[in-house]
């Protein structure tokens, strides 16, 4: 390890340092949740600063090329930091009334973020796997964070068992791809595979098996149909702030894995995995939306809708494989936009559940505008953005994906049409919540709980980003272009 | 990370030179957006914290509009004066590119810029919108002072100003459409401001729905334009649409484009048959009626047609339709205004009628005359509405003119300003209305739309009649005010009367100022050249006039033009004197008593016309008949058809969808083993497909 | 019934695996034999995961699957060409890492199983079905 390596892993070190700092603070001054949140935000801010400054030095590698810091890493790291910071800000209002400690929540969350950062930076298959496990293991714990609640633990055990199952499958595939291509370095794997693609080497059945296992493992992590079963149960059971995190953090992490693995390592064989991705995208968005139509629990509805959004993001991957590199930019933009609007929606649900015993069923939202006008308007905004109504971030994200898919043409173009149909169907269940909030008479008329300043701050940030990405997409399109260009140099200029 | 410093540059950076190659906007790039940003800030501030501000909630919104007014006037007069970078053809500024896919000017590119464009037409509108907006804001401080929703009212007013300013400043059809919907929304909010009042809520809904009809047309028109030329930038699109010989290659013919845009204009400017919402909109607070439903929003349609004048000029048949609908609305509304007894409704129908004049002017190709009338009408109708608000205020929220009378002495400021407004709208020289109305009628005649002129002359009689009927019933003669209220009748506070007097100034002078040094008075005074407004707007309307091929006829004060002026002044006087005869007058020299007996005899002589007018030509009944009775029958039939045929299909589709959802949801059994089995099966399918793919 | 089936499958797999190893030890050292064995082990693990209802047994099945992966990794490494020392070393490292991850997974898993056992008083996962559809 050299000093240069230290700069490259600087963001990671800062993140680990943040987690340890929270640990120490909680050790010395136990049960001071405000201080914990403050320290966590400070540490995350510092991590973001380190990430930006390390990223400004250009693409570099460390540890003999296993760890890579490029524009994609920087972009994803910043996204992870923002997601985790918002989750930590939203959590205390939900955790405190249920006597759940904030400090451990924050620590586990920041460690999960470290895993995601490793994942985003890996240029090595082994590191990819380690990062993935580091990211999902804390996720299992978070899902079961309310350990005296039977729903929370039930969601956690389903998530854990199926997650480990799929990890084993992923690892099996990884072993085969590694064994048959002869190296764990992603660039070497890509080199070997390009020989396969050009016909110099045979496409052996072992390699095909490895592909199948890898794809299955990854499809599980992003909750693509038919590997999505854990999502609704884990999301519904988890404490609401955790659900918010699970619906975006590990999902973006898994998409980072897809970008590193499928675009970089398996990129040369993209013609071979394209059909699989098309089928996955089509089934995922259709099933997610269809089942979401029938849900009466908003958390579960958003779980199914998150499956549908996974399907949309896969459209970007398909567009890339179909020859439109701008698909990756659409995917990254969608990921960023989806993160903030979805976190915002879950934050509103969490805020409503501040009084213990409030469920996330639709009836909770009946007549909400009279009790909580501000939260109602914010929720409406997030739901409109999830629907994809201009000028919100959700609209622009869908626009980018559909556009690149249409340009890719062929079956990917068909996918674009399917996506539009799906978005129309999705409007029904998103707007149903809006109708409940504005038109229905409230079921119970208890006084609205007071919400903390932190929560309002976090919601303001999520709102600002949801609107800003819709009105001024130029804000992050520059970063996204660079990020996409880091793994797909041919990425077309989108703007 | 070069990506990080990109965004700011993209937001604030690029400015685009105007069509005349002006270089850089300097301070204008900041000032023009500020005109919108200030009311926006006022709206956000008031919406967020206004509730806590109580009676001082007006400070920020009014201050914001005040500042915006200062900046707006500065911008407008620089634009009118032709200062660089505005030059002759205006200055366009791209704030940022919202959607940019593909390089501009390249086939298949879809670029949406958000930008502003200020030329002389925009400047004229800015003057009207901002000035009246500011005065209405000030007036509302007094008018709404006892309302519990004080802060909400100012928040909505600011929101309306934002939308209206965006509408006139935007340089892209898409942004205009957004603003179009936003003014509709804020109008809806303000009409229904007293939402506990059922009639107000219904009126708000009616306005919203009727406007939707027009909006659909406008939206389709915008799409048609995009299909034809592939851009949404207004100037660029018009240039491409009207390029020499381009029309043949368009998939959608020009007359359809023009008709669709006109449909949008009809909705917003309440032209027959979409006029029914405007009179009902009077349910809103009176300052709202003055600002939105007399002086600004209802002009949006006129502005839109004027802005896209080359498109209309390329579709001469549609121009005739515009003129016909305009002049028909004018006479229809004027005939209704003659018998209404609600003071605000008289003014509302009068607004419809005057808007009809403007469309008639647009239709005959007298674009400048239309904008001239838009400006003068904005001021005197704003004055009349605010005055009527002051009257209503004085007699304790009574709007029925039969319960007024003799108010002249009690509320002298209101009386005098309203009298000035009435003389102006009646078309008596030398007040503003005379110049603009005369120009419309004169142009119509000289451009060989004699029928428009003839109907217009009749409308002029009616206008003078109903306005002096209003003045007579309200201010002159015996008091018919409820004796309980009578002692409490009082003049409004100065915060309300000052705006009235300020508005009275342009009501008197604007026509003179804008028409000099041109006709009709210029030649008389030995001056030469076109009128000021003609001079300003010539570059804007030049393309349309070229396509139309209208030649500037020589102005003959002692020929045809003098005769036309004489005719219109004569008919205005006839209308005025008739109203005096019937409803009385209390001017210094003339003191006639009202003559209800004669009114009764006259109405008995034309019972049909009288009842028609009184019942607003049964339009509301017609709508009721159409949509409730016949529509109901039809609906009953359709319901049957629907249930038997359509519903089954639709229900089947919906049920299949939801059923599919439920069915698919059923695989979510809640049991881990079943899930794992699903994954295992998925894995096997995946492995199979990859093996097949590998074997290819 | 399931148990009988499971027992048969397991026994069969072991017999087959032992036979393959014997085949390998018998002289013709073959990578494919090891890979087949590891695949079989993996399949047995998967089968166990699908068939067992006890959360602990399912956890054990996952461990079995991970061990199958390790077997294939070590096999790949030891059958690599002698001049490819880096690849051989990599194999050992990956195997160690996988063991570490497996240990971490077991820890997290056991703690979650403990928590749900307290709530539901049963280790049988098919009774954890409060949430469905």
Image (cartoon, rainbow, N blue to C red):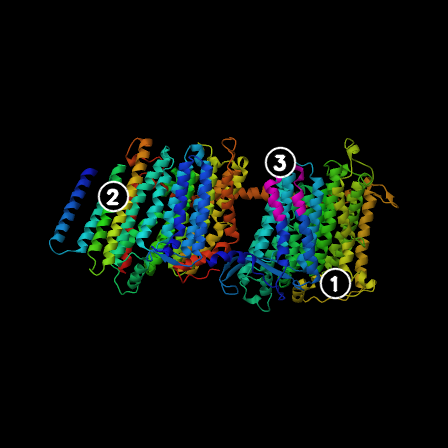
Q: Which mark is residue B100?
A: none
Q: Does the magenta portion include B111?
A: no
Residue ranking furthest to the left? C26
Q: Nearer the viewer, mark 2 or mark 3?
A: 2
State whether discs 2 and 3 lie on one chain. no
Helix, strand or loop at mark 3: loop
Q: Does the magenta portion include B44?
A: yes
Q: Nearer the viewer, mark 2 or mark 1?
A: 2
Instruction: State the predominant SS element of the stretch in magenta.
Output: helix
**Real-space Cα distance between discs 2 and 3?**
68 Å
In this rendering, does residue B55 appear at all? yes
Which chain does tag 3 point to? Answer: B
Quadrant of the image occupied by residue A107: top left
Which chain does tag 1 point to? Answer: B
Helix, strand or loop at mark 2: helix
Which residue is label 2 attached to?
C63
Residue A128: where, in percent of width, then height?
Answer: 33, 52
In the image shown, does A32 or A84 lie closer to the viewer? Answer: A32
Residue A253: where, in percent of width, then height?
Answer: 38, 49
Which residue is label 1 attached to?
B446
């Amino acid at each position: 390890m050299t000093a240069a390596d230290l700069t490259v892993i600087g963001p990671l070190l800062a993140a680990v340092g943040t987690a340890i700092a929270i640990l120490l603070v909680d050790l010395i001054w136990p049960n001071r949740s405000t201080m914990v949140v403050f320290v966590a935000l400070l540490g995350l801010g510092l991590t973001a600063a380190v990430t930006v400054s390390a990223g400004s030095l250009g693409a570099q590698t460390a540890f003999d090329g296993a760890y890579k810091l490029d524009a994609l890493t920087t972009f994803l790291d910043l996204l992870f930091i923002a997601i985790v910071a918002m989750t930590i800000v939203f959590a205390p209002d939900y955790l405190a009334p249920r006597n759940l400690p904030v400090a451990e929540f924050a620590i586990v969350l920041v460690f999960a973020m470290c895993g995601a950062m490793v994942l985003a930076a890996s240029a090595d298959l082994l590191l990819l796997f380690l990062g993935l496990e580091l990211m999902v293991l804390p996720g299992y714990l978070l899902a079961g964070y309310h350990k005296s609640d039977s729903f929370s633990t039930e969601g956690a055990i389903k998530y854990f068992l199926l997650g480990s199952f799929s990890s084993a499958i992923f690892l099996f595939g990884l072993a085969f791809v590694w064994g048959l291509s002869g190296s764990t370095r992603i660039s070497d794997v890509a080199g070997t595979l390009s020989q396969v693609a050009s016909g110099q080497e045979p496409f052996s059945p072992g390699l095909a098996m490895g592909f199948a296992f890898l794809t299955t493992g990854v499809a599980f992590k992003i909750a693509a149909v038919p590997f999505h079963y854990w999502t609704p149960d884990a999301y519904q059971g988890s404490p609401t702030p955790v659900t918010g995190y699970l619906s975006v953090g590990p999902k973006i992490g898994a998409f980072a894995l897809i970008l590193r693995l499928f675009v970089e390592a398996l990129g040369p064989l993209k013609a071979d995995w394209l059909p699989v991705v098309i089928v996955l995208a089509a089934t995922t968005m259709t099933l997610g939306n269809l089942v979401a139509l029938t849900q009466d629990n908003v958390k579960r509805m958003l779980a199914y809708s998150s499956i549908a959004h996974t399907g949309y993001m896969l459209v970007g991957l398909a567009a890339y494989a179909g020859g439109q590199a701008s698909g990756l930019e659409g995917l990254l933009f969608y990921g960023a936009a989806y993160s903030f609007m979805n976190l915002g929606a879950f934050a509103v649900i969490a805020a409503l559940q501040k009084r213990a015993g409030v469920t996330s069923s639709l009836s909770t939202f009946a007549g909400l505008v009279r009790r909580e006008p501000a939260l109602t308007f914010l929720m409406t905004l997030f739901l409109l953005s999830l629907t994809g109504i201009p000028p919100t971030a959700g609209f622009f994200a869908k626009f980018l994906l559909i556009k690149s898919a249409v340009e890719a043409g062929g079956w990917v173009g068909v996918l674009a049409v399917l996506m539009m149909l799906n978005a129309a169907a999705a409007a029904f269940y998103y707007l149903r919540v809006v109708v409940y909030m504005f038109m229905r008479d409230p079921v119970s008329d208890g006084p609205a709980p007071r919400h903390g300043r932190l929560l309002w701050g976090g919601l303001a940030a999520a709102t600002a980003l949801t609107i800003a990405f819709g009105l001024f997409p130029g804000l992050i399109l520059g970063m996204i272009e660079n990020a996409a260009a880091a793994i797909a140099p041919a990425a077309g200029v989108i703007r | 990370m070069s990506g990080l410093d990109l965004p700011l540059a993209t937001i604030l950076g690029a400015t685009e030179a105007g069509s005349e190659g002006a270089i850089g906007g300097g301070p204008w790039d900041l000032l023009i957006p500020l005109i919108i940003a200030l009311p926006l800030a006022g709206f956000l501030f008031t919406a967020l914290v206004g509730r806590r501000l109580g009676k001082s909630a007006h400070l920020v919104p009014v201050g914001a509009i005040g500042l915006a007014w200062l900046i707006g006037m500065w911008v407008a007069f620089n634009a009118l004066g032709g200062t660089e970078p505005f030059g002759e053809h205006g200055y366009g500024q791209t704030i940022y590119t919202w959607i940019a896919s593909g390089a501009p000017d390249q086939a298949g590119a879809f670029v949406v810029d958000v930008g502003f464009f200020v030329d002389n037409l925009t400047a004229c509108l800015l003057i009207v919108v901002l000035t009246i907006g500011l005065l209405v804001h000030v007036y509302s401080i007094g008018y709404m002072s006892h309302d519990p929703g004080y802060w909400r009212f100012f928040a909505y007013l600011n929101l309306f100003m934002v939308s209206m300013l965006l509408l006139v400043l935007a340089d892209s059809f898409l942004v205009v459409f957004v603003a179009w919907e936003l003014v509709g929304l804020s109008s809806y909010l303000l009409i229904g401001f007293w939402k506990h009042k059922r009639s107000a809520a219904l009126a708000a809904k009616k306005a919203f729905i009727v406007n939707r009809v027009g909006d659909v047309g406008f939206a389709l028109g915008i799409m048609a334009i995009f299909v034809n030329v592939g851009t949404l930038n207004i100037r660029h699109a018009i240039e491409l649409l009207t390029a020499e010989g381009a029309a043949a290659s368009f998939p959608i013919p020009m007359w359809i484009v023009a008709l669709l845009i006109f449909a949008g204009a009809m909705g917003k400017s309440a032209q027959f048959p979409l006029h029914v919402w405007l009179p009902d909109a009077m349910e809103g607070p009176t300052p709202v009626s003055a600002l939105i439903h007399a002086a600004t929003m209802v002009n949006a349609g006129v502005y839109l047609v004027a802005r896209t004048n080359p498109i209309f000029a390329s579709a001469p048949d549609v121009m005739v339709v515009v003129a016909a609908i305009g002049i028909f609305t004018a006479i229809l509304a004027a005939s209704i205004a003659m018998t209404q007894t609600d003071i605000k409704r008289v003014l509302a129908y009068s607004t419809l009628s005057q808007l009809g004049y403007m469309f008639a002017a647009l239709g005959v190709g007298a674009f400048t005359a239309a904008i001239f009338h838009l400006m003068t009408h904005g001021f005197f109708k704003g004055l009349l509405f605010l005055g009527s608000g002051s009257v209503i205020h004085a007699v304790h929220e009574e709007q029925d003119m039969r319960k007024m009378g003799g108010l002249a002495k009690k509320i002298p400021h209101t009386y005098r300003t309203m009298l000035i407004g009435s003389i102006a709208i009646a078309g008596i020289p030398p007040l503003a209305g005379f110049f603009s109305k005369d120009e419309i009628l004169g142009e119509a005649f000289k451009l060989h739309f004699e029928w428009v002129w003839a109907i217009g002359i009749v409308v002029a009689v009616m206008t003078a009649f109903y306005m002096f009927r209003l003045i007579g019933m309200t201010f002159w003669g015996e008091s018919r005010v409820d004796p309980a209220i009578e002692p409490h009748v009082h003049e409004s506070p100065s915060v309300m009367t000052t705006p009235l007097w300020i508005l009275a100034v342009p009501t008197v002078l604007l026509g003179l100022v804008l028409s000099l040094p041109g006709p009709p008075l210029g030649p008389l005074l030995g001056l030469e050249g076109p009128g000021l407004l003609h001079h300003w707007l010539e570059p804007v309307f030049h393309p349309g006039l070229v396509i139309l091929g209208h030649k500037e006829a020589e102005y003959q004060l002692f020929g045809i033009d003098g005769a036309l002026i004489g005719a219109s002044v004569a008919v205005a006087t006839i209308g005025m004197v008739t109203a005096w005869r019937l409803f009385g007058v209390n001017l210094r020299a003339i003191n006639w008593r009202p003559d209800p007996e004669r009114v009764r005899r006259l109405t008995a002589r034309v019972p049909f016309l009288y009842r028609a007018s009184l019942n607003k030509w049964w339009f509301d009944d017609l709508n009721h008949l159409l949509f409730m009775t016949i529509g109901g029958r039809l609906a009953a039939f359709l319901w049957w058809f629907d249930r038997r045929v359509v519903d089954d299909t639709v229900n089947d589709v919906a049920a299949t969808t939801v059923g599919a959802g439920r069915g698919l949801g059923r695989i979510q059994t809640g049991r881990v083993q079943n899930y794992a089995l699903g994954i295992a099966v998925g894995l096997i399918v995946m492995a199979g497909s990859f093996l097949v793919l590998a074997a290819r | 019934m399931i148990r009988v089936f499971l027992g048969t499958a397991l026994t069969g797999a072991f017999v087959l695996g032992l036979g393959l190893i014997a085949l390998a030890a018998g002289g013709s050292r073959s990578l494919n034999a090891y890979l087949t064995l590891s695949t079989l082990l993996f399949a047995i693990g998967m089968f166990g995961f699908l068939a067992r209802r006890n959360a602990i047994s399912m956890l054990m099945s996952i461990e079995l699957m991970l061990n199958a992966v390790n077997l294939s990794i070590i096999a790949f490494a030891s059958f690599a060409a002698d001049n490819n020392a880096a690849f051989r070393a990599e194999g050992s490292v990956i195997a160690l890492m996988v063991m570490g991850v497996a240990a971490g997974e077991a820890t997290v898993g056991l703690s979650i199983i403990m928590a749900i056992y307290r709530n539901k008083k049963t280790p049988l996962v098919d009774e954890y079905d409060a949430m469905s559809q």
